[in-house]
Amino acid sequence: MLKITRYQRYLLSLLSGLLMVLSFPYTGSLTPLIFVSFVPLLLVENTIARNNYRSGKVFIHAYITFLVYNIGTTWWIWNASSGGALMAFILNALLMAIAFYIFHIIKKKLGKKVSYLVLPIVWIGFEYVHYYWELSWPWLSFGNIFSIRTTWIQWYEFTGSLGGTLWVLIANLLVFKIITDWKGNTTTFQKMRPAIWSLILVLVLPLLISLVLYSTYKEEKRPIEVVLLQPNIDPYNEKFTASLESQLDKMLDLADSKVTANTDLVVAPETAISWSFYEEDFARLPFYPYLKNRVSNWGDAYFLSGASTLRIFKKSHSRASRPLEGGPGFFESYNSSLLMDSASNYSFLHKSKLVLGVEKLPFSDWLPFLEELSIENGGTSGTLGIEEEPQVMHTNNFTFAPLICYESIYGEFNAEQVKKGAEAIIVITNDGWWGDTPGYKQHMSFSRLRAIENRRSVARSANTGTSCIIDQRGDVITQTEYWKSAVIKGNINLNKNVTFYSSTGDLLGKTCTIMGFILLLMSMFKNRFKKE
């Protein structure tokens, strides 16, 4: 039996967290380390289980691991909000530790024979549920780690990013088995060979499949010309204080420098129109004639821009509704996409996936006083209104999926847009809140996963950070530098074909969630069944 002291357990817990940090994009980018990152924590869990120590010890060690993982990979949140950072670190580590603790309890109740199935089922189920509930924060899902190794994961078009999580967990479990068998002196090398060969197969086969898919995938030539604007307006000291006219001038002058007769779409970043306005009044606003005139000079090109908008309702519409001052009715604030053509036709879509603490206060439906704790974000605070389901936007020639900032992390959300006819993905974001840190780099890299999952080209406009064009294999074709005003002109190919992932969504996540729930119930009622 492999003996581990109390002191060594704590070192191993720290080691697991450190390996996860070093494997994550731009906080180490040593991607292969993820395939052994769980092993130290699994050794700790195994020691606690074998010695019949209280199960609470597993939770403590898991919390240490995941607290290191959260702080080490997303420390940059502190630059935008110290309170938001603490909430993200403490709560997300807590949720991850609970998921690992549930794995331990089920394994303890149902026996060692199911242990190699329980961890992948429980963890993938956790990641899937974490996409959808009030405390959603899927930034650190393990499938995201491969966003900078897109030649490794072309099979995401079948599994989505949760397939990457499954890959990570199976590899870690096999490494753990090999180590415990070897150190425990319970198995000869001859008997260990199946596990060793299984590990080699698990690591190599997905890589080979991916390389074949990568080398054989060909984009259909259906190009549209896009112009992507990066105005580089300081979100803290300029964006919400300088005049709107000066900011529009800066952006539209950038566009004029690149727009041609062939341009189909000009894209400005999230909240490019930073001053809030009522959507019903858009055509009567002072800046509307100016914007209309500038866009009309671009021929048939459409203009997509982020905007801060409001709508009026006679009755309370959702938890985002606020009473109108001095009159009957309610209003809601939105983080919106505005699409406008040269004939001045326009439409709005609202962001659906909101950032915790900034755009959404969790559980405020039941605890309304929490809205007072919201973090101000450029003049708006409190929970914003949302679209109830994923939507797409249409031009005369094509349909696209508009993703505002945080929405680009949600694979199944984007897949729903593709099912509704999106032929390309357009991301608008403002990544200047975090400074020159791994944050904006990680965010951009996640868009590469959406390209592979749906085989859709991605055009990304960031206020600052990284504006870029990504092809349908997840390759970055061209990109801007950080904190520089820039404009990109390029072609992206449209695609109408729907991948398996786009059509089914996170089938793996749904399956594991159901199976995990069943396993949890079985573990809870096992002793009762025995008595009966």
Image (cartoon, rainbow, N blue to C red):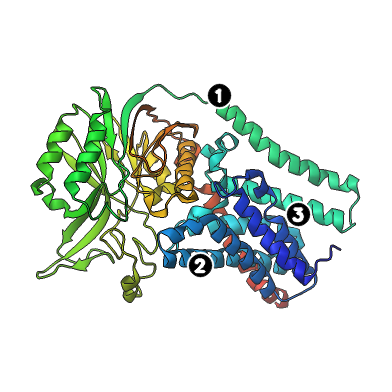
User: Which residue in the structure is indicated by mark 1?
Assistant: 216
Q: Position of residue 238 (x, y in %)?
A: 27, 52
Numbered disc 2: secondary structure: helix
Q: Amino acid at mark 1?
A: Thr
Q: Nearer the viewer, residue 198 or 97?
A: 97
Say if 498 sits above or below 135 in the image.
above
Give the mark nearest the N terminus, 3 or 1: 3
Total number of numbered discs in the rendering: 3
The residue beneath circle 3 is: 176
Q: Is residue 247 left or right of residue 23?
A: left
Q: Is residue 344 visible?
A: no
The residue shown at (20%, 53%) is 275
Q: Residue furthest bottom?
A: 531
Q: Which residue is mark 2?
A: 91
Say few, some or many: other residues with alpha carbon within 10 Å of mark 3 (under 14 / 14 to 19 / 20 or more): many
What type is the residue that disc 3 sits on? Phe
Mark 1: give few (<14), some (14-19) or many (20+) Cα within 10 Å.
few
Residue 9 found in image quarter: bottom right
Residue 464: x and y in percent read 36, 44
Label 2 vs label 1: CA separation?
A: 43 Å
Q: Earlier in the sequence, mark 3 or mark 2?
A: 2
Q: Where does the N terminus fall, quadrant-wise?
A: bottom right
